Amino acid sequence: MTQAIASAGRGTRLTPSAKRTRRITRPLQYIALAAYVVFLGFPLLFLLITAFKTPQELQSPNPAFLPQQPNLDNFFAAIEKANLIQAAGNSLFVAVLTTVIVTVISLPAAYALARFRTMLRGIATGWILLSQVFPFILIIIPLFLVLKQIGLINNLFGLVLVYTVWSLPFALWMLQGYVSGVPIELEEAGSMDGASRIRVLRSIVLPLLAPGLVATSLFTFISSWNEFFFALVLIQDPSLQTLPLTLARFVGAEGQVQLGQLAAASLLATIPSLVFFALIQRRLTSGLTSGAVKG
Amino acid sequence: MTTEATRAMVSERETRAPKPPKTPRRKSLGNIGRGGREAWLLVLPALIPVVLFSVYPLVQGILLGFTDAKAGLGQVVTFNGVDNYVKLLGNELFWNSFRIGLIWAFGVTILQFFAALGLALLLNLDIKFRWLARTLALVPWAMPPVIIAIMWRLMLNPTYGPINGFLRAIGLPGDTNWLGDFSTALPAVIVVGVWAGMPQTTITLLAGLQNVSADLHEAAAIDGANALQRFWHITLPALRPVIVAITTLDLIWNFNSFALVYVLTAGGPGGQTMLPMLFAYNEAFRYGNFGYAAAMGNVMVVVIAAFLFFYLRSQARSRLS
């Protein structure tokens, strides 16, 4: 109720005629909202439901919408069959290592970009935008050849290298934004009180930067965890496959019977992303809109 | 990850606005603000890998498009000038895939823009269940494209899928093989593309909407403008830079997208959903024609760049006039 009052002030004062049109538009708005909720949410719901159905239910000509005997069999079967544990281990290894390297490298660089404002800043932004335009096919072929020469094809470290390089520009960009958000006066005050340069960075800048650092590293983690194309080209050995690769291969062999396992495996593979997303959801939206809510 | 690019793009435009003078403060920093050399030293660990493993390969990739490079050891690579492009001109399959790629990219971008604008407008209202729609609109972001594709394969499954189930329930023929039929495969894939890209577009537009001045709206309302007029004359012009930025990025991303369609249809049936990226991937890693595939990549870049040039220029012009 209070919300309603607060936001009525945001838009416009309602004249009587506006109230009348509102009585017509409100229901339409709710219908539209419902349509969006169904379009966006139903596929997710259906994936969830499918994961709990038995093969018999999946094969039946008139499948019931809800699972009749919900159980976790699909999850166990998927884990066994699709080699999910190993793939998850590979994904985890690659994503964690990438995140650590990217964070360690980009932190000083982001500081430099934010505080020194050299031409590097423009170059970094330019590269971020430019690298979006080029199709990956142009990069992957030479990269494939180079990595082959140094023996990093079919090697998780090769994948880490590629992911590091491709996450860096974004991580840098994000982080330098957070660095800019730390008032430089604090640093000045610190050094005026006689703290050394390192001390200023460690005891003043770093603690203030912590939330931004977390968000950036989570972003890096998730983009490595989800990546498919580079992994498809660079990893051939089944025992080195990452989760998206394993799942994509699982698709090819799907019969009606396996749909449940496929859904279960997909759900399991999405969990880390969803957890991450739940963690930073507020930051994500508020960060994007923070400039907006001035008054 | 992707919003960052949008934000970079939007803020690039905004930073052209006059900046407050900052120089004096920087001077006062003394030992902190002095060094260009110090900056380079800090940036170097990030710069070296990026140059070695993304700038260099990219340049190499562009050059590769002018050679006859093939997969396999001990192949002699020679420059063959424009041979690849002459050959491409006559390659009907490639142009067909190119046409499909354009339909896909424009289809997804345009539909997604309208869907996301509608949703953003709703989310900008004070309306019950807003949190639900908002959360759902963000979820695709958290999902790997491979899993989005798997999920929609379930949805579109001819026998088990709920879409056909629903059609049967209301008495329509519910046996369409959405992803396997020549006429429905591309539209079906486009719908999935729209679903997958909703978060970035919606959030960006919503952020833009919240930037639209409420005072202007109020003034217009007092002057008797109805909601539609206010939307047309106040909201839309104010939203314009954001719209241009997000549709541009969406178009690029869609044109270069791979994983979603690779898992959904792998380009089938009969090449009906063979996006240029899939086509080039097959050419390179299935048939081993590296040089030829890189040439396709070059053509894609040129077309996208040309389109962006005209689109952004026309937008810049109409903004000035």
Image (cartoon, rainbow, N blue to C red):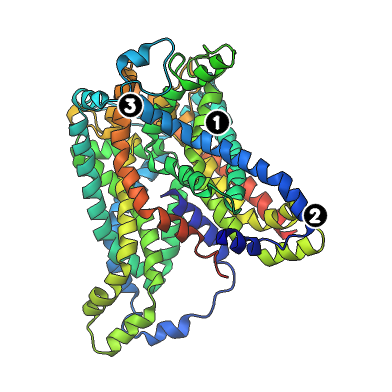
Residue at (74% x, 55% y) in the render: B230
| Residue B81 appearing in the image | no
Along the horizontal axis of the image, is A204 left or right of B93? left
Name the quarter where the C terminus of chain B is drawn.
bottom right
Q: Which residue is mark 2?
A: A17
- Please identify, in this view, whether the residue under mark 1 or under mark 3 is nearer the observer: 3
Looking at the picture, tell me which residue is in the foreground, A231 or B137: B137
Q: Quadrant of residue B281?
A: top left
- Could you tell me which secondary element the residue under label 1 belongs to? helix
- Circle 3 packing at 10 Å, graded few (<14), some (14-19), many (20+), is many
Q: Separation of disc 2 and disc 1 at Cα? A: 44 Å
Looking at the picture, tell me which residue is in the foreground, A132 or B224: B224
Question: Disc 2 sits on a residue from what chain?
Answer: A
Looking at the picture, tell me which residue is in the foreground, B158 or B266: B158
- Compared to A24, does B83 lie above or below? above
Q: Which residue is mark 3?
A: A51
